[in-house]
Each structure stands twice: as C-alpha cells, then as structure tokens.
Amino acid sequence: MPAPLFLITLRYLQPLEEVERHLEAHRAYLRQGYAQGVFLASGRLEPRTGGVILARAADRAAVDTLVAQDPFHRERIAAYTIQEWWPSMTAEGLEPLRVL
C-alpha cells in the first residue's frame, strides 16, 4: 500500500514583511522536499495568511521531522497543522495520489 498523504497547513504568525524576509529560505526548503520526492504540491493561501503543502511520507513522525527543518518553523514565522489523509477517489489523471 502506498504511503499516506499529509496536508500541512501553515498560518503566518508574523507580518508579511517578516514572511518576505524568510521566503527565499522557505522556497529552498520546498525545493529540497520536491527533490526528495516528499512534496507533491504547495502554495500560498489567498488572502495571504499562510500556505499549504501536500506531502507523501511513511508516517507522521517523518513529516514532523521534515517540518522542523522549515525556516518558517525555526524562525517562528508560521504555525503548522498536519493532517494525515488517505484519498480513495481522485479526478482522472490523479490516480497516483490514491492510497485506498
């Protein structure tokens, strides 16, 4: 069975000026997650209050370890909510995301 997906929701704790100051480091972190094959999609929320990352990992502990490496986490720029997700249905073309 494929590994579960995780919805990682970020909520900014700091003003956007502070978010912008750390944004390039956060993007480098995201690029690393994509290169490792863990991150599947990411982007900011609108209004600009945070963002969402879709990840595939073996378990919650692996995601917790990964989130701890995010500069937004280390610098207390954002708070994180992590939810395990087991999609059973998808639109055509997104079948690889299914785990049930």
Image (cartoon, grey):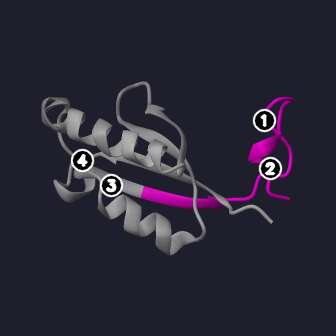
* Mark with earlier residue (4, 2): 4
Residue named by callout 4: 13
| Left or right: where 81 falls relative to 24 | right
Q: Main secondary structure of the magenta part?
A: loop
Mark 3, mark 1: which one is toward the viewer?
1
* Membership of 64 in magenta stretch: no
How far apart are labels 1 and 2 at the CA level? 8 Å
Q: In the image, which residues are magenta?
A: 81-100
How far apart are labels 4 and 3 at the CA level? 7 Å
Q: Secondary structure at mark 1?
A: loop
Q: Contact, CB < 8 Å: mark 4 with mark 2?
A: no
Q: Secondary structure at mark 2?
A: loop
The one nearer the camera, 38 or 80, is: 38
Q: Contact, CB < 8 Å: mark 4 with mark 3?
A: yes
Residue 78 screen position, x and y as percent: 28, 49
Q: Callout 3: 10 Å neighbours few (<14), some, many (20+)?
A: some
Q: Residue at x 21, y 48 (%)?
A: 77
Based on the displayed image, in which of its 4 quarters is residue 56 positioned?
A: bottom right
Q: Callout 4: 10 Å neighbours few (<14), some, many (20+)?
A: some
Point out which mark residue 44 bears. none
* Mark with earlier residue (3, 1): 3
Point out which mark residue 79 bears. 3
Residue named by callout 2: 98
The one nearer the camera, 62 or 89, is: 62
Q: Residue at x 44, y 31 (%)?
A: 45
The disc labelled 1 sits on which kind of residue?
A: Leu
Residue named by callout 1: 94
